[in-house]
Amino acid sequence: MANVTLRNVRKTYPGGVEAIKGITFDVPDGQFCVLVGPSGCGKSTLLRMVAGLETVTSGEIDIGGRVVNQVEPADRDIAMVFQNYALYPHMSVYNNMAYGLRNRGMAKPEIDKRVREAAQILEIGPMLERKPRQLSGGQRQRVAMGRAIVRQPKVFLFDEPLSNLDAKLRIAMRVEIRKLQRRLNTTSIYVTHDQLEAMTLADILVVMNGGVVEQIGNPLDIYQKPATTFVASFIGAPPMNLTPLRGDEAGIRFTSGGSVPAGTILGVRPEDLTVSTGDAPEGGVSYDLIVEAIERVGAETFVYGSRSGAKEAAAVSAKPGELPPGEIIVRIPGQAAPAIGAAIRAVAPRDKLHLFAADGRSRIDL
Amino acid sequence: MQKQATFNSRWLPWLLIAPQMIVVLVFFYWPAGQAVLQSFLLQDAFGLSTTFVWFENYKELFADPDYFATIVRTFAFAFAIALSSLSLSLLLAVMADKPLRGSAIYRTLLIWPYAVAPPVAGVLWVFMLNPSLGVLAHGLRAMGVDWNPLLDGNQAAALIILASAWKQISYNFLFFLAGLQSIPRSVHEAAAIDGARPMRRFWTVTFPLLTPTIFFLIVVNIVYAFFDTFGVIDTMTRGGPAKATETLVYKVYVDGLLGGNLGGSAAQSVILMGLVIVLTAIQFRFVERKVTY
């Protein structure tokens, strides 16, 4: 049992590329921390630095009160689950799990006890004598987990462990990982690019982008109060609608709470918009939209609309994961949806609005 | 999608494979048939008359203690060459696999010996180890070794093994390097986290995963040591001193072309041919079988 603390951790590759630009956060004992971000944001690099598979350029990584910058991976008392599982192909499931214990000179009966215990927890008991190639993706995943838990380490590290599984299995394993972590109460750091996984697993969510932390906190807090436009569009699916306010809009709508400069970005989540024929409530926002596309998911329907007269705002190009300017997504419960080409009005109340500075780097509280 | 091409014409497929078939017929089946035929014949000393003697040549061969000595010697050479070449090239491949600066240059240099023709390699080593001229021979003498492979059979054998193994290192190196690179990096990393030190990691993870490559290379190296060392032996020792470096293939040449015993030499060729067939069969049966993890 241990907490993990990162203090101003940096990573610069020999070529001069700075992958991690000074990251500080703390994972208290027994908590489940998820690092989430788009590919290339440095989240896997950071995890590998905690594991000791990458060197730390500067800063400190502290596991259980001990700075481990110079400690070998084997001596950090961590276990890691890899994206491709990294099972030993020539060893049976039993030996895959026992390998780490044998290397540490554990007595045979104790190894046997631990392996069988882990196999029972993960329901892979009947497969102990099989080779990894004889297992399905989900079973390999379990063996990789088993290999981690038999060691009873201080910290579990997960590097996108579910990304090779199909959608249904991914959800099932996600729940199991959460249950297992609760049961063992082991500090965990989990890397994913899937915001849904991040939201559902995390006690502490760390949203990363371009080698820096965009926001750290409880997943629901982050969802409710994203600190930057990046977080706003990355957490939540479909992403938050973000529209820069024109000069006239900025003045009219926010006079009561003091004025904001033109170019300030207004954000509203698709699920907070409702289709209405009337005006927006006091201080709220309304969009007049032409319906361009409809996605029916079953329980809900997403309407993609373009703002009438918003084409001139398209000067700002969209960033990856963000909507093109002028496009607004509205979530409607159920299956009833307007026809394509119809004109609709979507409104949101004032308390559902988010405001960000023009550069998107800071949040303005209303 | 149809994967196989279909020919409407009857003779076109035959025409297309004809060049390859002609090469195989002229350069393999024809001489092989000749050798089998020849091995049943006995010629008199002047080559004037030929008698059909059935298995007389083979009987004579197996009654000859000299022949058995050559078989044992050839196997010993093959074993020594395969072992030294494989272990050295594995060591080099493991080192070249590490992320080093300029590793591309090392890798290229390590592949060069493969481009050297066996007789050239032989001449190279002969010069370096010539008792009166050689640079290495001079060094050996300075260390107190009485180096004279022209007289000492064991030293001559060591010379052949050295030159032959050196020649084969590049080939083995290439396969080992490819084998090593096909092992996912995360498997090594998982083993490192699992507390296996580098040496233990090599013997418990890397080496077992390389076994398909190792089996394949053992067969290839044995075949090489049996048949392709002719050039090295001919330029370096000519089978001497006192037959100390005469292998089965070299004996075929010595008995047939130099000794004029065409029948006996042909019988030896046929036996060698059988050996190649057996080795190839082993190769296909056990080694070429796809090993997938």
Image (cartoon, coloured by chain):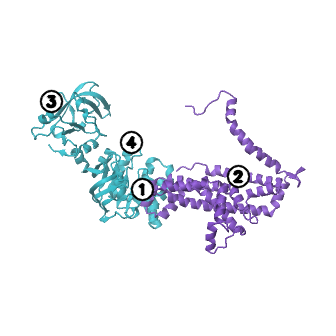
Q: Nearer the viewer, mark 3 or mark 4?
A: 3
Disc sitting over residue A167 in the figure:
4
Name the residue carrying label 3.
A279
Q: Chain of mark 2?
A: B
Tell me the SS state at disc 2: helix
Q: Which chain is purple?
A: B
**Labelled pair 2, 1 in contact (Cβ < 8 Å):** no
Give the chain letter at badge 4.
Answer: A
Q: The chain shown in cyan is which?
A: A
- Estimate the spatial distance between the alpha carbons at disc 2 and disc 3, rounded to whole Å: 91 Å
- Residue at the spot of label 1: A146
> Is disc 4 surrounded by few (<14), some (14 to 19) or many (20+) residues within 10 Å?
few
* Subunit of label 3: A
- Please tell me how many numbered marks the rendered image carries: 4
* Mark 4 residue type: Ala
Residue B276, disc: 2
Say which of marks 3 and 1 sits in front.
Answer: 3
Relative image position of residue A261 (x, y in whole percent) = 14, 39
Q: Nearer the viewer, mark 2 or mark 4?
A: 2
Identify which residue is drawn at 83% across, 53% down. Answer: B263
| In the rendered image, the vertical position of residue B268 relative to residue A270, given as above or below | below
What is the three-letter code of the residue carrying label 2?
Val
Q: Are marks 3 and 1 on the same chain?
A: yes
Quarter that holds the C terminus of chain A: top left
Q: Quadrant of the N terminus of chain A?
A: bottom left
Q: Is the Cβ of the residue at disc 4 closer than 8 Å to that at disc 1?
A: no
| Callout 3 touching callout 4 (CB < 8 Å) | no
Q: Quadrant of residue B125?
A: bottom right
- The quadrant in which residue B120 appears is bottom right
Measure the C-alpha gap from mark 3 to mark 1.
Answer: 57 Å
Q: Is residue A217 visible?
A: no
